Image: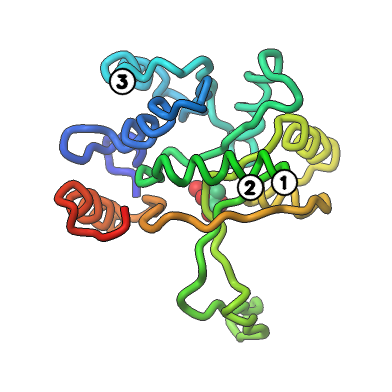
Amino acid sequence: MNSKSKPKQFLEMHGKPIIIYTLEYFNEHPEIDAICIVCLYGWEKELERLLTSYNIHKVKWVTTGGETGHDSIFNGLKVMKNDLQDKDVVIIHDGVRPLISKELIDKNIKTVALYGNSITVEKANESIVQINDNGIIDNVPSRAKMRIAKAPQCFRFEEIWTVHEQAQKDGFKSIDSAHLLHYYGHTLHTVESTPYNIKIATPSDFYVFRALFEAMENSQIFGI
Ligand SMILES: C[C@](O)(CO)[C@H](O)COP(=O)(O)O
């Protein structure tokens, strides 16, 4: 949904870029020590300007994105590697999920502390069907067990680094970190997302974001 002039994470809502809404949750969270941003090539200067302007002071590393999400995450891990200990917790989030909450960050941190990793998921409230190459449904999994993988996805540095290194050797590209760890046989633990943790991927998502944001500001939505 990138506009003609801007990639979606830099689009503004009420004068503030989406990426800043997202970053503010991490910047203000007491248990977040440092932030790494993997930035779209060519937008680094604009990002630096925004970080200064909105005082996002916890950003310690900015690096350039790769061709895929998988490559971008690996770029982020590489730039942080020398500063992190194996047991440090890495919380991987999408810049275009600005309705994350402190509560969801808290839940993820607690789950990593207990089990070693944490994948944010949402219950599927519609049926999910698997199709074959001809568009024919060949599997209808039980909806009760279906979850939609979201972000944040959180790991000890050692665990996420090891699978990325292995994937480099194997030439394997994952859809996201949950997929990558599952591929290499790791046990993954889940936390249920807070509501409204939407990913802004299409123009309609942008309008949903605006409506939700305004409703939250006016306390019209119960349970935020
Ligand atoms: C991590 C994620 O948000 C889970 O749904 C998603 O996989 C990210 O996908 P993207 O295509 O890299 O935005």
Task: Identify whether 35 is placed above or below 200.
Answer: above
Residue at the image position 31 percent from the left and 53 percent from the top: 224
* Residue labelled with disc 3: 50
Which of pointers 3 and 2 indicates the residue nearer the eye?
Answer: 2
Amino acid at the residue labelled 3:
Leu
* Residue labelled with disc 1: 115
Q: Are marks 2 and 1 in contact (CB under 8 Å)?
A: yes
Place of residue 203 in the rendered image (x, y in percent of width and height, measured from the top left):
29, 55
User: Disc 3 and disc 2: Cα gap in Å?
Assistant: 30 Å
Task: Identify whether 150 is placed above or below 11.
Answer: below
Amino acid at the residue labelled 2:
Ser
User: Disc 3 and disc 1: Cα gap in Å?
Assistant: 36 Å
Residue at the image position 50 percent from the left and 19 percent from the top: 62
Left or right: 168 as drawn, with respect to 43: right
Place of residue 84 in the rendered image (x, y in percent of width and height, measured from the top left):
68, 19
Q: Earlier in the sequence, mark 3 or mark 2?
A: 3
Task: Identify whether 150 is placed above or below 105.
Answer: below
Residue at the image position 70 percent from the left and 34 percent from the top: 156
User: Disc 2 and disc 1: Cα gap in Å?
Assistant: 8 Å
Tag count: 3
Amino acid at the residue labelled 1:
Tyr
Which of pointers 2 and 1 indicates the residue nearer the eye?
Answer: 1
Determine the image quadrant of residue 153.
top right
Mark 3 residue CB less than 8 A from any atom of ligand 1: no
Name the residue nearer the viewer: 111 or 129.
Answer: 111
Place of residue 73 in the rendered image (x, y in percent of width and height, measured from the top left):
61, 34
